Image (cartoon, helix red, strand yellow):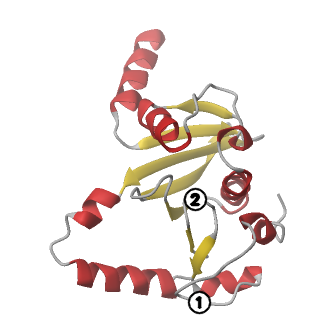
Amino acid sequence: MRNQADLYLSALIDRSQDLLLAVDLDCHLTAFNDAFRKNMELAFGIELTVGICPRDLMPSERALLWAGFYERARRDGTFQVVYSFSAGSAWDLAFKTMVFSDETIGVSVSGKAITDRQLSNDQPVESDVRFRKLFDENSSVMLLVEPTSGEIVAANRAASVYGLSFKPASIALSSAASMMGNTSM
């Protein structure tokens, strides 16, 4: 009966259009669904396998950013970010600590595409104002990252804890690595 339950669970996960993945404590991929696999192939031209690390998937600045996301989930628990894998795609990603028998075993990530939802909005100006207010005034650190270069192009007020000053229009850092160097990874 357990094998049948695993089969149904696997089919359910793979049928989802949401991005679903899990990493172990060393940030190695332990599971992912077809939507995540396809998105990574499209964005970075790579083929996913279980056991691969972020540094093997994407440019180093992005890999450092993802390693920071995983560390934050292990340290602080659940949080969400808006992230773009490639130009024109935006995802609402939720990072959650995975616990089994009271022991942390890794981090799960689920992502919902928000690009289509934003593009279909009948009132884009109102949506933009709401997003800007949510971004600027959120107590969580929020960064807008240019997908190709990994350059941080905007940061909210909460980013000042990393030494970034609030600039809604543009923040240019040499790399995300300089920002992540202030955290314990």
Viewer-proximal residue, 5 or 142? 142
Corner quadrant of residue 65: bottom right
Percent position (x, y) of residue 35? 41, 36
What's the residue type where badge 1 is placed?
A: Lys
What's the residue type where badge 2 is placed?
A: Thr
Q: Which residue carries the number 2 mark?
A: 78
Q: Earlier in the sequence, mark 1 or mark 2?
A: 2
Report whether residue 100 is seen: no
Most distant residue in the left direction: 122
Percent position (x, y) of residue 57? 65, 40
Tag 1 secondary structure: loop
Q: Which residue carries the number 1 mark?
A: 167
Tag 2 secondary structure: loop
**Residue ID at (19%, 64%):** 120
Corner quadrant of residue 133: bottom left
In the rendered image, the vertical position of residue 3 relative to residue 14, given as above or below:
above
Label 1: how many Cα within 10 Å (few below 14, some 14–19, many 20+): few
**Residue ID at (48%, 47%):** 110
